[in-house]
């Protein structure tokens, strides 16, 4: 009862937001259940602006708004450089992969990233590549989703004193319901709504420390020379506003690459390209997605550093060891019901948009690419089983959220490293390199995963000099090299020339197909 | 704020402007499922 009395405005805003999400799921439930193409890729008929906002909101999750924003409390304003790398990879993803992946997957009738590998490479290892990539997705995604749910649950504890376990359960359960109902339709349309909300919330959040301190000049004066202590126990002084003073640029680069590269490798981002309806929509998304992301990141990536201006020395000493709680602290300290309600709803939106996308990906991969590839099932059973798989996997994520193994930033950057190292060479090679083979794809994927694990658990923290070199850097390079070398060595495994000609748009002049690549 | 820290804010803005200029000059073609290569044998994908 006291929860309702104390936080009625926040609860009201959250209830309205959840009602909209569930309404979208309900609206699309029948259309989505018609078949695999509808449930998995929304029949490739979604407007570009919706996909653009969906890509932005899927990528910018609570990990960004809570984990990364909070990390700046320890790293200072230099942490904004992470946002530069992420914006760059957003551009690269849309420029290099967007249109090509949309066209090739439409032609191949691919509905997931793993089945793209099988249909594109058509080698004796193609089926194995599909299953391996499916297993990698299932393994890496659970940590990512747990990281998101953890961030949101911490926020509920900070702002409303909702028990951690109940907060995590509510977040996962609501997201699961609308995802199961509407499949890709509800994921994309709710993502678009969430994208608008989190863009606005990024701008609102960055103003709070300035308002609290009494203006930009006052806040910058406070954080430019501060007596709070760093993670090492030394006084920060001017470290918050001095480049790479509190963390090394190598570490910034590592997180910038590991998380940013998800946009060029992670299925929940890549599968967005499948659903764009036409060239006009694609062009809109290619221009505006980096704008939405870049401006939001400018607002939130340095936020933690600004929060020093709101904290006492004692509060800062606690927060520097618990940076996931910085944003919750900021909202509690600002102490305005309307602002907290707006931000909390937006942060929930950020978390739910990413969770929903990941849920759909693991459900589709588990059923279509692991189960169906292992023991083929009747087509009409695929969608109902996908729905069931989403529910089961969500329960697993809940358990991982209750017992998380590390902080949000490390959890998600590790998952990102796995994806970037194992998927990018096979995706990029599939789209651009005629000479890329299924063997190259399979072995680069396996080598990428193994090198990631070895660097992380065998080398990185054992040798002081390697500590700041994120596993993404060596494992990505090794995996890319493996793809090139093994593809060259297994040239006899190339798919038929006719298949490649069609994929790469080489059609005999004068045929009806020569005219097929029209702009819409 | 020192120069290199401030440069991050400028860099993001430069990136999005350059990106928009590149995309405006690109020729973008989007194909329908029936206009592109056929699904492989056994492809369980679309309808």
Image (cartoon, coloured by chain):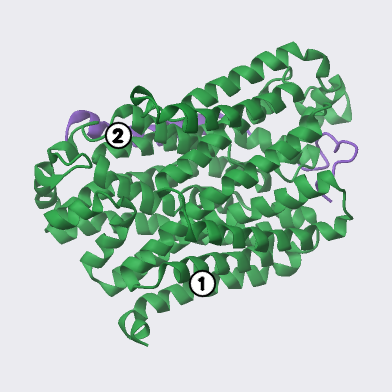
With A504 as the anchor, is A342 left or right in this view?
A: left
Q: Which chain is green?
A: A
Residue A88, which numbered label?
none
Residue A217 percent location from the top left of the image: 10, 49
Task: Give neighbour class at mark 1: few <14, some 14-19, many 20+ (Cα, 10 Å).
Answer: some
Residue A446 percent location from the top left of the image: 65, 29
Picture residue at 77% right of the left edge, 60% below the top? A385
The N terminus of chain A appears in which quarter of the rendering?
bottom left
Picture residue at 46% right of the left edge, 45% below the top? A411
Residue A18, which numbered label?
1
Residue where numbered disc 2 is placed: B8
Q: Which chain is purple?
A: B
With A461 as the anchor, is A190 left or right in this view?
A: right
Image mark count? 2
With A348 as the anchor, is A145 left or right in this view?
A: right
Which of the two residues, A82 or A455, is positioned nearer the viewer here? A455
Picture residue at 35% right of the left edge, 79% below the top? A9
Cα–Cα span, label 2 and label 1: 36 Å
Q: Is residue A350 above or below residue A438?
A: below
The residue tagged with tag 2: helix, strand or loop?
helix
The C terminus of chain A appears in which quarter of the rendering?
top right
What chain letter is assigned to the residue under label 1? A
Q: Is residue A66 above or below residue A450?
A: below
């Amino acid at each position: 009862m006291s929860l309702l009395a104390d936080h009625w405005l926040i609860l009201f805003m959250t209830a309205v937001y959840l009602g909209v999400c569930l309404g979208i799921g309900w609206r699309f439930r029948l259309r989505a259940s018609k078949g695999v193409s509808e449930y998995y890729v929304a029949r490739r008929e979604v407007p570009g602006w919706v996909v653009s906002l969906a890509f932005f909101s899927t990528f910018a999750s609570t990990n960004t708004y809570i984990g990364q924003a909070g990390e700046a409390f320890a790293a200072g304003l230099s942490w904004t450089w992470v946002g530069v790398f992420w914006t760059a990879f957003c551009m690269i993803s849309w420029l290099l992969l967007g249109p090509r992946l949309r066209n090739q997957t439409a032609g191949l009738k691919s509905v997931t990233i793993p089945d793209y590998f099988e249909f594109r490479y058509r080698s004796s290892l193609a089926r194995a590549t599909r299953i391996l990539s499916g297993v990698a997705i299932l393994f890496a995604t659970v940590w990512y989703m747990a990281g998101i749910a953890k961030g949101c649950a911490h926020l509920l504890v900070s702002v409303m004193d909702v028990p951690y376990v109940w907060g995590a359960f509510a977040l996962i359960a609501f997201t699961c319901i609308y995802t199961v109902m509407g499949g890709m339709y509800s994921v994309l349309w709710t993502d678009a709504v969430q994208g608008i909300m989190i863009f606005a919330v990024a701008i609102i959040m960055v103003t709070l420390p300035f308002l609290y301190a009494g203006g930009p000049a006052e806040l910058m004066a406070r954080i430019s020379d501060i007596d709070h202590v760093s993670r090492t126990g030394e006084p920060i002084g001017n470290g918050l506003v001095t480049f790479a003073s509190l963390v090394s640029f190598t570490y910034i680069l590592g997180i910038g690459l590991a998380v940013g590269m998800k946009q060029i490798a992670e299925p929940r981002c890549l599968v967005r390209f499948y659903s764009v309806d036409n060239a006009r929509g694609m062009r809109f998304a290619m221009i505006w997605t980096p704008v939405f992301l870049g401006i939001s990141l400018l607002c939130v990536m340095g936020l933690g550093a600004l929060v020093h201006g709101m904290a006492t020395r004692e509060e800062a000493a606690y927060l520097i060891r618990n940076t996931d709680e910085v944003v919750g602290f900021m909202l509690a300290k600002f102490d305005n019901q309307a602002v907290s309600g707006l931000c909390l709803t937006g942060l929930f939106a950020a978390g739910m948009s990413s969770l929903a996308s990941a849920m759909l990906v693991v459900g589709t991969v588990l059923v279509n690419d692991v189960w169906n590839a292992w023991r083929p099932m009747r087509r009409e059973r695929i969608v109902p089983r996908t729905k069931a798989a989403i529910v089961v996997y969500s329960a697993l994520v809940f358990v991982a959220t209750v017992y998380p193994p590390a902080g949000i930033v490390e959890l998600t950057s590790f998952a990102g490293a796995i994806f970037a190292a194992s998927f990018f060479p096979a995706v990029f090679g599939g789209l651009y390199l005629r000479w890329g083979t299924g063997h190259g794809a399979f072995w680069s994927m396996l080598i990428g995963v193994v090198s990631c694990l070895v660097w992380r658990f065998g080398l990185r923290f054992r040798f002081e000099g390697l500590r700041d070199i994120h596993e993404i850097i060596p494992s990505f390079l090794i995996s890319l090299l493996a793809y090139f070398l093994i593809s060259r060595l297994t040239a006899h495994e190339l798919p038929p020339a006719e298949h490649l000609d069609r994929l790469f748009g080489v059609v005999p002049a004068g045929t009806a197909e020569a005219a097929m690549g029209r702009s819409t | 704020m020192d120069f290199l820290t401030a440069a991050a804010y400028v860099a993001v803005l430069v990136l999005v402007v350059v990106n928009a200029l590149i995309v405006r000059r690109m020729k973008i073609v989007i194909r329908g499922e029936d206009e592109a290569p056929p699904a492989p044998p056994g492809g369980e994908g679309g309808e």
